[in-house]
Image: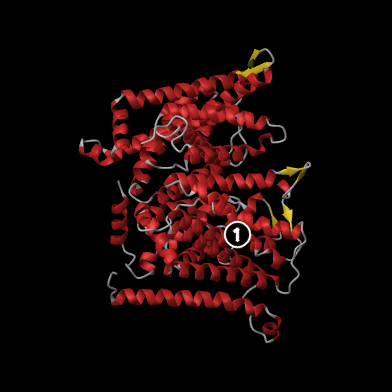
Amino acid sequence: MDAFVQLVILGLLAGGVYVAVGVGFGLVWGVLNIVNLAHGALVVVGGYITWQLFTGFGLDPFLTLPLDAAALFILGYALQRGVINRIIRAPLLFTFLLTFGVNLVIVNILLLIFGSDFRSVTPAYSGQGLELGSVVIPYVRLASLGAAILLAAGLAFLLNRTRIGLAIHAISADRDAAQLVGIDLRHAYAVTYGLGAACAGIAGGLIAMIQAITPTAGEPYTLQAFVVVILGGLGRVSATVVGGLAFGLVEAFGQSIPGSGSVFANAIAFGLMVLVLVTRPQGLMGRLH
Amino acid sequence: MIATTDSQRRWRRAFVIAGAIVAGYALLAPLTSLDVAQSANIPLLADKFWFRIATYIVMFVVMASAWNIIGGITGYAAFGNVAFFGIGAYTTGMLIAKAKWPFLLALPLAPVLAASFAALIGLPLLRLRGHYFAVASLGVGVALGELVQNIDYDGRPVFGGASGLFLPIYAVGHRGLFFFYLMCGAAALAIAVTWWVLRSRFGYGLIAIRENEEAAAVLGVNTTAYKVAAFALAAALTGLAGGIFSQWNVFINQDNAFPIEYNVQMILMALLGGTGTVFGPAAGALLLQLLIQFLGGSLPISLDIPFVSSEARPIIAQVILGLLLIVVVVFVPRGAIDFFGGRTRLSLAYLRRSLRETSL
């Protein structure tokens, strides 16, 4: 029983990171219909900004998160406005290839700047944790779960309660009708992608505190974001939260199977995703259209 | 059918002639490495290094042409075809290394196994459309590579594990020449199959599925059977390339049998040359692979990039490749075939038109 509780806690903590990685990806996919293969690279950019501010200026890593978000919002806005907007009406394969190209450029520029060494962010409190019986929960992980939930809540608030959020809902429902009622599509698309990138930046900041990062570390995050979004169901932030936490739990339990270890992480994730896609394509929380 | 003008016909003829010259050179140059040619003092046009690059290029011709069948003709954006390459490589590799089969007996099983696997996963996966199919097929490719590397039985890795699988060297004179012509045979097969598909009832069914799947079903096309067959056909050809690769390279592991970047490369090659055409993917494979090798600095002719140290060079090459990918996708979305095929000229007006068509 104790081991079970420990697995649940571990799974939920890991799930927090997946929520953070998934929400931005889900937003861009759900609204813009772009499967953003550069998402993982944007996550890593966020991680490096946090690392640079922490080692260079001694800033507390949690305080760097808003800066990650701001920097990546600007990068994402520019990227969508300048490049991705130009192929919105092309077949879907092109968005795949384009974002893969963007991914390639970002990853290799990071390699040029930072080299391929592993970097980690270790504030003074990183070794401490909350002791619950035999289970120790690191404060950093607990705080990042909290930060991820806050991020999701903030995004949901922004989408449902603000003017730009309504505009994003409108372009998601019907692009041409949205244009007819006076929404500036180019701007709204760029803001949406910028928001997705900002979420990726915050996710990167959180990840840098938990594990070491390297420029090429982004690809698994893109793949995990896919799985999380599909698991929860496309189109709502709350569904991605459920998907992220569920994915964390499945991974924790999958890795606890004797003999499997952590080496099958991708296989478990993708096996699960293919299963969900085939049996329940709308996701756990999704609604059928 | 758009009427062709004289200038278009001239363009097309120029490209056909250029293609024939390239193909003729590629097929004849290896012969200069034979002993007969050497004793007759014919200059050596193909050394070991030439064979390595040329075989790589032809391998991508096979893979891009195979992708074209499911991605270009049927319109299903398969993003995990590298799974079939890996299955082919490991089928042949295991049969040779562990079961001690002779290579030529083990090779035919590579496409058979790859096609069977494709049919098996195709039945559920091909029910998905658009992004979902692309993502699911990518997942299959990634998961399969991981499984192959990590499956243990009795505490010992079944497929060679993380240290990979070593094959005995195939005893044949002129190894480079042998594997180059073998790969060329596979490429000729892939191109011939594409040619046949585009002229058959089967191919018309696939094109109907691409254009409108519901309408195709109403017209009596058994869409499930057609899609699975196209997927299996693509898998068989890709698996064949993998099977040849394993014996040619003598060593396979997760990194060289299941490289994720091949997925993108084969699609880009098909797009660059023109999807849904017979020779487009082959031309795209030649162009892109030459460019990749050139940027990576492994061609004899290479250009020095100023202010770049030799360690940074492969990284800069990747940046250039990424930027090129972006430029091609944004400006030439219908593939270079539009002007190679003589349908239009490469001009500023063309670039602006295609930009306007896809922009928001």
Q: Is residue A63 visible?
A: no
Near-viewer residue (A128 or A289): A289
Which percent across, then down, holds residue A284? 47, 31
Q: Mark 1 falls on what kind of element?
A: helix
Q: How many numbered callouts?
A: 1
Q: Tell me the amino acid under the disc marked 1.
A: Gly
Front one among B330 and A156: A156
* Relative side of A163 to A111, left or right: left
Q: Is residue A17 left or right of residue B112?
A: left
Relative to B110, residue A98 above or below? above
- Where residue A130 sits, quadrant-wise, is top right
Q: Quadrant of residue B4?
A: bottom left
Looking at the picture, how far across and down is residue B241, in whole percent?
Answer: 60, 62
When the figure is inspected, residue A186 is found, relative to residue B244, above or below; the finding is above
Q: Is residue B272 left or right of residue B218?
A: right
Of B334 and B154, the residue lying toward us: B154
- Please provide percent x and percent y for residue A210: 59, 27
Q: Residues within 10 Å of mark 1 (few under 14, many from 20)?
A: many
Residue at the image position 49 percent from the left and 24 percent from the top: A148
Figure coloring = secondary structure
Q: Position of residue B348 (x, y in %)?
A: 30, 61
Name above or below for residue A174 compared with residue A63: below
Residue found 34% across the figure and 46% down from its top:
A88
Q: Which residue is mark 1?
A: B239
Give the residue at the far bottom of this rendering. B40
In the rendered image, which quarter contains the N terminus of chain A? top right
**Image quarter hosting the C terminus of chain A:** top left
Task: Identify the subunit bearing mark 1.
Answer: B
Q: Is residue A261 visible?
A: yes
**Which residue is more in the foreground, B61 or B204?**
B204
